[in-house]
Image (spheres, rainbow, N blue to C red):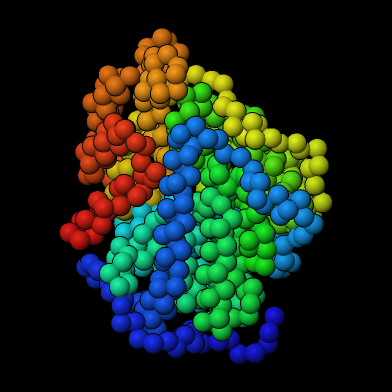
Amino acid sequence: MSTATEPTRTPDATTPTASGFRRVGRPVEGEATILVPELQALLTDLHRLFEPARRQRLAARVARQAEFDAGMLPDFRADTRAIREGDWTVAPIPAALQDRRVEITGPVDPKMVINALNSGANCFMADFEDSNAPSFANQITGQRALRDAVDGILTFTAPETGKRYALDPASKTVLIVRPRGWHLDEVHVTVDGQPMGGGLFDLATFAFHNAKTLAWRERGPYFYLPKMECMEEARLWDEVMAFLEVRLNLPVGTMKATVLIETLPAVFEMHEILHALRGRIVGLNCGRWDYIFSWLKTLRRHADKVLPERGQVTMAQPFLKAYSELLIQTCHRRGAHAMGGMAAQIPIKGDDEANALAMQRVRADKLREVTAGHDGTWVAHPALIPIAREVFDAHMPTKHQHHVKREDVQVTRDDLLKPSLGTITRAGFDNNVDVCVRYMAAWLAGSGCVPIHHLMEDAATAEISRTQLWRWLHHPQIAAKNGVPAEPLHLDDGTPVDWALFERALINLPSVIGDRRAITGGERLDAAIALLDRLTHADTLEAFLTSAAYPQLVDSDARGA
């Protein structure tokens, strides 16, 4: 580490005035200290340079999905065979990211940031995406919290208890930030009348305020990049970070990235994604929940691609085992980390037997990951860190497992596309409805991560439930278009999975929930029910729940609700 004086907080980012920049909506607390004129100018230039390419990539997604809807299946690209077969590796991984055996993830509110950085995990993924409801207040609060965390001055006092939280100066946990994906807008900030890309706003704002400090400490800035579908999207991120390095006077390659492989198209382009980011990428991550959601969404018009209820779609299923092992093989061939997925369980208070069973499931999941060759794993709660660390320490004495090449893995396209066997139970169907509504209500109220039935639910897990409902209920129409007898699916007790079943579940849900004041976002319960009803009945599956619900969140911002 350099012994020079630590740089000042304000980066050198002198640019022309941001004449096209506009902040839309009600002011939120603290935004003036974040959206300073120099940042506004940087965001303006960033948007003008990269927004056309972002829109082009999103249009390419739509076009490719239309091909899948027409019967085509995802596959490995013929035009990139040389990349997959070539002998190359990614750039060396920095010392701070060599050992990532246990990572904790969560939203960017001050309390979570403090607890995560004090947790003892190797890394903390501060999430502006799936575990964050992107009200502008949440975005600004998150950016302020991370800036203060980098400065070591972040504190929080819980209003309900008066308990004070503060960063442990001895914390060694490495901060990694996940911006929003390419598909999400930030409508509260426009340039030349267009909303900014949410991911561009998140990444650039964090980098502007923190990159120089983190680079001086040799601790970043580091990012998790979500929801990518192809190498061209990865290349666009690389271009964005290269631009920011120049503007912020950082050495080339300072910004490092880990990419979440959480879409079905992306699993066929893992070598290509690594190659597109080879100067700054350090690993790929098995974003298992979003991957299941994407599998369902991508193959939504294929009558033979139906999955059983959510609880039966485990990593032991052949198509998910193939995905995980192919990722390990790919990463280790290229000198990159292969990160495992999220354990969604959380401690269960007041029921020792149920809690022991939940922790047993966590332990088994982490044992599966480390023995398969993963270099690290995710947890959603600090209490799970000791379990994950114990398992990885016992089976991974080195900082990582790049030496585990998994040359035994032979994965074909069909292996990745073959659905798992299983059933749909009434409890499983009703649970999907219940989870969707509870999560949507919480999200609309500003909470992007919420415990439901002893699991930590975020947008990814809620999306599985939503997409399964749509897929099951629209199966007769899909089957008919595929030349298959247009009969509804059935529960394991013979009950048809039809609209009557769905409507009964929706009608009964308020009484099942009981006192809505006892759940997060209970005041938005009716809006959540209406939203799920609309999205499920729609002839076309909405690409993302968060995109569909975002206007309501924005409306709440505008009303100060």
Percent x, y for residue 452?
Answer: 40, 38
In the displayed structure image, the side of residue 393 where residue 53 appears, left or right:
left
Residue occupying the far top of the picture: 494
Front-most of residues 265 and 102? 265
**Residue pictured at 31% horizontal, 47% vertical:** 548
**Residue pictured at 63% horizontal, 46% vertical:** 77
Front-most of residues 101 and 491? 491
**Residue pictured at 28% horizontal, 45% vertical:** 521
**Residue pictured at 32% horizontal, 72% vertical:** 191
Q: Is residue 15 placed above or below 215 in the rendered structure?
A: below
Q: Is residue 367 placed above or below 23 in the rendered structure?
A: above
Instruction: Write down the quadrant of residue 94 in the picture.
Output: bottom right
Percent x, y for residue 47?
Answer: 40, 71
Which image quadrant: the C terminus? bottom left
Front-most of residues 287 and 243? 243
Percent x, y for residue 148?
Answer: 46, 74
Which image quadrant: the N terminus? bottom right
Instruction: Write down the quadrant of residue 512 in the picture.
Output: top left
Residue 135 shows up from this direction:
yes
